Amino acid sequence: MISTTENLEGEGQPSSLSSTSEAIGNHSAILPTTRTKFEDLSPELICDIFDLFCTEANVLYHAFYNLNLRLNYVLQQTKVHITHSSYSLVPQIIHPKQIQSLHMLICDQRKSFAFLTSLSPGTMVSLKLELAHGDNLIRSILSTLTNFQKLKTLNLRVIIISEQVERELHQTVSQLPRLKVQ
């Protein structure tokens, strides 16, 4: 409760505010009371909000895609995270240049390599690949990795790999400036 006593000019009587709601009510005349809808926010702010979700594209697109054309446009500008469950959205809805992080189980080597080469080196910061075997595929992946200069996280899970390819992998990883080897 706010309680004040002050002399008002021209009146000899003290004035008092006896409740918080009265105090807030007095200030509401000063502050405009407008309601802002999510759709009214700037595209940049909506993209920032989407980034805060840090969720995979599948969830983000199912929640917001096709609500209206403006949100569709904003979603198409948003950097996204792709995992196994949202891989089907690419390229029908999500453009490969939007992908910021990728977690992919490689089954079809040709299709997977074609997809990896379509990614934008300027936006990709995290890459996690899982495959059973394939020195040739790993060498192909290594040839594209050097383009990803902003890559901060790389996780390759390979069940069978030759010692020669493993050495090549370490050599390639050492060329990526932002990637920290642990």
Image: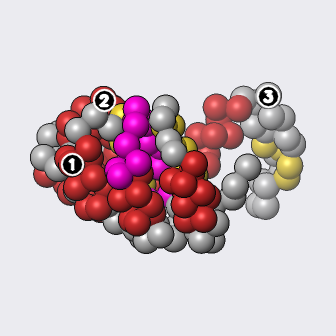
Spatial separation of the CA atoms under disc 1 and disc 3: 71 Å
The magenta stretch spans which residues? 124-137
Q: Nearer the viewer, mark 2 or mark 1?
A: 1
Helix or strand or loop: what does disc 2 sit on?
A: helix
Q: Amino acid at mark 1?
A: Arg
Q: Residue at horizontal 41%, vertical 48%?
A: 135
Q: Does the magenta run of residues contain 6? A: no
Q: Position of residue 59 (x, y in %)?
A: 33, 32
| Mark nearer the N terminus (2 vs 1) | 2
> Is residue 36 shown to the viewer in this render?
no
Q: Amino acid at mark 3?
A: Met
Q: Nearer the viewer, mark 1 or mark 3?
A: 1
Left or right: where 69 falls relative to 44: left
Q: Do the residues bearing badges 1 and 3 touch, measured as CB atoms within 8 Å? A: no
Q: Position of residue 107 (x, y in %)?
A: 28, 34
In the image, is residue 167 above or below residue 160?
below
Q: Amino acid at mark 2?
A: Ser
User: Mark 3 sits on what residue?
Assistant: 1
User: Mark 2 sits on what residue?
Assistant: 85
User: Mark 1 sits on what residue?
Assistant: 110
In the image, is residue 40 above or below residue 157?
below
Q: Quadrant of the N terminus?
A: top right
Q: Quadrant of residue 43?
A: bottom left
Q: Position of residue 166 (x, y in %)?
A: 56, 51
Helix or strand or loop: what does disc 1 sit on?
A: helix
State the residue in front, 61 or 3: 61
| Mark nearer the N terminus (1 vs 3) | 3
Helix or strand or loop: what does disc 3 sit on?
A: loop
Q: Position of residue 117 (x, y in %)?
A: 29, 61
